[in-house]
Amino acid sequence: MNGQKINKLFESELDVLNMGLESFSETLSERGVRSTQIDWTPPAGGKADLIEALDFLETRKEDIDKANAKALEIIQKGKPEIVDIQIAGEVIPGMTAKTVLHAGPPVTWEKMCGPMKGAVIGGLIFEGLAANREEAETMAASGEILFDPCHHHSTVGPMAGIVTASMPVWVLKNSVYGNTAFATLNEGLGKVLRYGAFSDEVIDKLRWMRDELAPILKKALALHGPVDMKTLISQVLQMGDEGHNRNRAGTSLFIREMAAHLVMLDEDKEKIAKVFNFMHQNDHFFLNLTMPTCKCLIDAARDIENSSLIVTQARNGTEFGIQVSGLGSMWFTGPASKVDGLYLPGYTEEDAGLDIGDSTITETVGIGGFAMAAAPAIVKFVGGSPDDAMKFTQDMYEITMGENSVFQIPALDFRGTPTGIDLMKIAETGIYPVINTGIAHKDPGIGMVGAGLVKPPVNCYEDALKAFKEALDKN
C-alpha cells in the first residue's frame, strides 16, 4: 500500500477488527476508535507438529471424507434392540471364571485406583473366589485373575465397570449390522459395586439381582419381544433426559414398556412388586441400557480405513483413553482428570477419586454431555446453569460429523444431537468433548460422593492425530 493510500485510510473513520493480543484493541478503544476483539486461536493451538499433521491430512481429504461419511451412515442406520438377559460367563466372548472386566483402557491391579480395587474385591467375593477383602486383594495381586477392558469384549461398564462371570448382563443386538453389546444391570446409587463399595449389603443386592431380578426381567422380556432402544432414547430426549446422568424419563418409559408382561408372569406377587419397586426407586436403571445401545451403534463403525471417527472414550480412574475407527484397537491415553462437580452431604472435593467409567460411550455417540440442551434440569445434578447446558451442546456441533437423524432436541427446534466425533475437528478447533459423570470416593469400599463435569486429557487426541497421519502416510 503506498503512502497516499495509508494517509487516506487514517483520515477516514476507522472500524477495526482485531485478532490476537487484546491490548491492541484496548488501546484503540481508549483513543476513541471503534474496535472489536475477535475470539480466534490458530488451528491446533499453533502447535507446529499438529499443524503439519493437519496439512498432510488435508491432502487426503477425499479419502477421509468418504470414510467418515460411511462411518456416520452406519451410526445413523444402526438399530440396537434389547434381546435377552444372560449370565456374563455364558455369553460374553472370551469370558472365563477368573476374568474380571473393568472400565477404561487396560490397567494392572497395581495401578488401579481405589474405587476400581474396591469393585474388584467385591466382584471376587461375589464369585466366591475370595471370602473377604484380604483374600480378594491377595488373589488380585497373584496374577491368577485376568483383568481386561470391557471394551475388548463388546461390553461397557459404568464407573469401575467390573463384570465377573456370574453376573447377569443385558444382551443388545444391532439388527441392521448384526453386532452385539453387553452391560450389567444397574444397581442404583450410593454404596454400590460400580462405585467401589463391597460391604455385605452390596454383595447381597448383587445376589438378589442375579437370583430374582434378572430371571424375572428375562421372562418378561421373552413375553415382550425385542425392545427398540433407538425409539426409546429418542423419546427420553424429548422428555428431559440426556441419556447419561439423567435417566428418570428413560427408567419410567422402560417400566411402562415391561409392566403388562411382568404382571402376567407366574411368579410370587411380592417378588414382582420388589422388581417394580427396585426400578421405580432407581432413576439410573436406564443408564445400563443407553450404554450398550451406544456401544452397539458405534462398534459397527469400527475399523473403517481412513476414518477419523472416535469410537471409544473411556476411563479407568487412572487413565483416560480413546480409540479411532481408522486405527484399529490402538489406545491413546492420558492421565484421568479431576471432576468439577457437586457433592453429596458429608463429602467434599478432598474425598473425590479421578474420572472413571465407560459411560462416556454415550457422549461418543452423541447423547449425554452432547445432548445437555435437551435436559436443562441435569445441571442440578452435575453443576452449571441451563445456559451452560445449551452452550455445551452447541459447541459439540463444531467437532462432530453430523446431526443425529433420530435423537433430537426440542429446545433447538428438534435439531439432531451432535453425532460422530471427528478427531481432526478437535485438533482444528481446540474444542474437546463435554463429559458429565458421577464421582466415586477415592478410597475402596465407600461408593458415590457426587457428580459433575470433566475435561478429558488433551494429549490423547493429539497423539491420536499424529498416529492417524502416520497411518495414512503409509497407505
Image (spheres, helix red, strand yellow):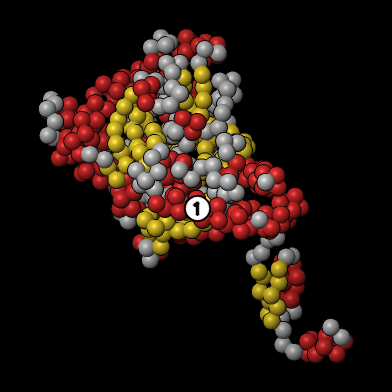
Q: How many marks?
A: 1
Would you say 456 lies left or right of 9 here?
Answer: left
Residue at image location 30% in from the left, 50% down from the top? 231
Between residue 382 and residue 44, name the one nearer to us. Answer: 44
Would you say 227 lies left or right of 31 here?
Answer: left
Q: Quadrant of the N terminus?
A: bottom right
Depicted 171 relative to depicted 131: above or below: below
Residue at image location 45% in from the left, 43% down from the top? 300
Between residue 68 and residue 236, name the one nearer to us. Answer: 68
In this rendering, does residue 45 appear at all?
A: no
Would you say 114 lies left or right of 460 here?
Answer: left
Give amino acid for label 1. Answer: Lys
Between residue 216 and residue 115, name the one nearer to us. Answer: 216
Residue 257 quadrant:
top left
In this rendering, does residue 406 appear at all?
A: yes
| Residue 392 spot, x, y in % from top left | 49, 56
Which residue is under mark 1?
Answer: 70
- Around disc 1, counting alpha carbons within 10 Å, would you say few (fewer than 14), some (14 to 19), or many (20 or more)? some
| Residue 29 spot, x, y in % from top left | 71, 76
Depicted 399 relative to depicted 116: above or below: below
Residue at image location 47% in from the left, 56% down from the top? 418
Residue at image location 50% in from the left, 50% down from the top? 71
Would you say 274 lies left or right of 286 here?
Answer: left
| Residue 325 spot, x, y in % from top left | 55, 44
| Residue 90 spot, x, y in % from top left | 36, 22
| Mark 1 residue element | helix
Query: Residue lying farthest front?
Result: 475
Depicted 36 relative to depicted 286: above or below: below
Residue 270 quadrant:
top left
